[in-house]
Amino acid sequence: MQEAVILKLKNGTRPEDLAQAQAKVEAAQAILYDAEQHYNRIQAVYEETTGTRYEDIAEAEAQLQALRDELARQEFLLTQYELTSPTDGVIRSRLLEVGDMASPSAPLFKISLNERKWIRAYVNEADLGKVFEGQAAQVFIDSYPDTAIAGQIGYISSTAEFTPKTVQTDELRTSLVYEVRVYVEDSKNILRLGMPATVAIDLQ
C-alpha cells in the first residue's frame, strides 16, 4: 500500500484527479442551484402568506450559506490544479516533465517577460566611473539602425570579468569589463530575446 502511495506521488496529478475535482465543483454548483430555488420558493410563500415561520427561513438561509461556502471551497481546490504565471511572457524552456512532482519553491518554466525588457552591455574599467544607475542610454538594433530606443541604466555589476565572446568591440576583447543593464520601455515589441544590440551612453 505504501509503494502505491509513493507511486501516486511520483506520477503527480492524473487526468482522472482533475476530472474528479471538476465533477465536485459541478456537483456543488448543482446543489447550490437547487438550494437557491428552494430558498426562493420559501421566500415567495413567506411574502404571500404568513404561514412560514421565521425558524424555517433562518434554516433555509443557513443551508444556503453553507452550500455557497462549500462551492467556494471546491472552486478554490480546482484552482490548485491550474498553473498560472504571475506575469505575461513567453515560455523559453520547460524545467519539469509531465509526471514530475512540482512544489511552490521549484520553478517549472523559464519565461521571458514581455514587460520591462533590458539589454546587457559592457563598460571598460576606465569608463566605469562615468556611468551610474538612472543614466540615460540609447539602444540601436540592425533592423532599425536609424531609430533609437530610449532606456536607462538600471544595474551595474560590482565585479569585473573578461569580455564575453559575443561582444563585437575589438578593443575590449582582451580587457576587463563590467556588465551594465539598460532597461527600456518597448511598447512596440521590437526587441527580441537574444537579439544583438548596440548601446550608446553619453560619458561626458
Image (cartoon, rainbow, N blue to C red):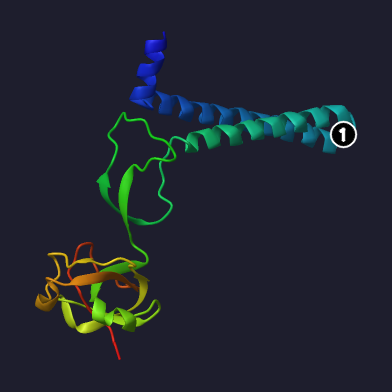
- Residue 139 position (above or below residue 75): below
The C terminus - image quarter: bottom left
Q: Which residue: 38% across, 19% down?
A: 8
Q: Residue lying furthest bottom in this view?
A: 204
Q: Residue lying furthest left in this view?
A: 170
Which residue matches tag 1?
49
Query: Number of marks in the image?
Result: 1
Mark 1 lies on a secondary structure that is loop
Q: Is residue 48 left or right of residue 198?
A: right
Q: Residue lying furthest right in this view?
A: 50
Q: Is residue 66 left or right of residue 102?
A: right
Q: Is residue 163 left or right of residue 203?
A: left
Percent position (x, y) of residue 169? 12, 76
- Residue 172 position (above or below residue 76): below
Q: Nearer the viewer, residue 188 or 11?
A: 11
In the rendered image, which quarter is residue 68 located in? top right
Percent position (x, y) of residue 97? 27, 34
Percent position (x, y) of residue 27? 54, 26
Q: Amino acid at mark 1?
A: Thr
Q: Which residue: 30% across, 49% down?
A: 110
Q: Which residue: 22% across, 83% down?
A: 147
In the rendered image, which quarter is residue 153 located in? bottom left
